[in-house]
Image (spheres, rainbow, N blue to C red):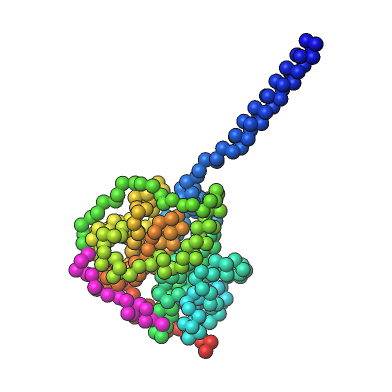
Amino acid sequence: MKTMKKQMYFLWAVVFAFAFLTSCSKDDDDDPQPEINESEVLVNYLASAESPLGKDYVNTDLPSIMSASEVKTMNETGQVYIIDIRAAADFANGYIENAVNVSPGQALEHIKGVDLAPYTKVAIVCYSGQTAGWVTSILRLMGYDKVFSMKWGMSSWHTDFSGPWNSNISNSHSTQFTSDATDKPAKGNLPTLSTGKKTGQEILEARVAAVLAEGFDAAKITKGAVWDNLNSHFIANYWPAAQYVTPGHIPGAVQYTPKASLSLDADLKTLPTNKPVVVYCYTGQTSAFLTAYLRIIGYDAKSLLYGANGMIYDDLVALSMTAWSANEIKDYEYVTSK
């Protein structure tokens, strides 16, 4: 009898231990996985050799721009694949021979289906070079290292398309630029991303899809919208420190050095997450490139259309800085589909 009782006690002990271990295992399985900082994962990934481009694009090659003359020469020898992202009606009125018309939001899906092996470069063409810069930056970040935007857009190809640049150079704020410096804020946090993804590549793909769906309209801002309420924006002057002093900058703008300042180890975290970040350069083309990246990593970033050319044009010309001129119009032949 005693032996039987001992056996029963032993069996109950085994059952209890099994139940306890099973319960612990379930509790362990139910424990939530530690949350990741998606934006930090993404920023580190895009700056690494494991990224689609294999390098920190923002602080090395950005922007990737080719001239209209280079597009023409390469097109004549079949070395360039041309994607025109203007509206279909404008494309029909005149386009570069061999160009294909694709909407900006579909550029990534389109290029995925193109055999790029025969081509040395891919040219993205728009009206002024600004939307093309935004698209090119996204494609580059996704690993398409042959992609370049065409400088000045179709405005440079022929007089018939030069209206966007001819009508937007201005000296409207030449007396308001200042040389008084504004210090960078203290470093804070990166924006919060909530894609639900874990790896850098997965987060990148989700963010690129979101930014393409928003379109360039969400990534641009006019000078009027900025100057009418300077305090509601954080303004980033994206050109060298010497030019921040001469010809000066928008009052309150903070200087960020191209290819240096906007990395995680430098000053990226000084950009605020609680207000729009307006980036401006000389022409709005480089700022469009940078804005695409900043929006992908979560900032409410906007590129100031036409850059300093739309505010202090004569000063740029006097200092031999990048400025639109009639000399940029090449008057190359084009075709129509009307």
- In percent of width and height, residue 311 lies at 27, 70
- In percent of width and height, residue 206 lies at 53, 57
Give the quadrant of residue 216. Answer: bottom left
- The residue most toward the front is 1
Q: Would you say 172 lies left or right of 138 here? A: left
* Residue 236 belongs to magenta span: no
- In percent of width and height, residue 331 lies at 42, 84
Q: Is residue 147 visible?
A: yes
**Which of these two is toward me, 223 or 59?**
223
* Residue 167 belongs to magenta span: yes
Taking 76 as reference, is 247 above or below it?
A: above
* Residue sitting at x 43%, y 51%: 192
Magenta: main secondary structure equals: loop
* Residue sitting at x 29%, y 60%: 232
* Residue sitting at x 53%, y 60%: 142
Give the quadrant of residue 79. Answer: bottom right
- The residue most toward the top is 2
Taking 122 as reference, is 87 above or below it?
A: below
Task: Tell me the quadrant of the picture where the N terminus can be found.
Answer: top right
Taking 322 as reference, is 26 above or below it?
A: above
Give the quadrant of residue 238. Answer: bottom left
Q: What's the magenta region?
A: 161-177
* Residue sitting at x 53%, y 82%: 97
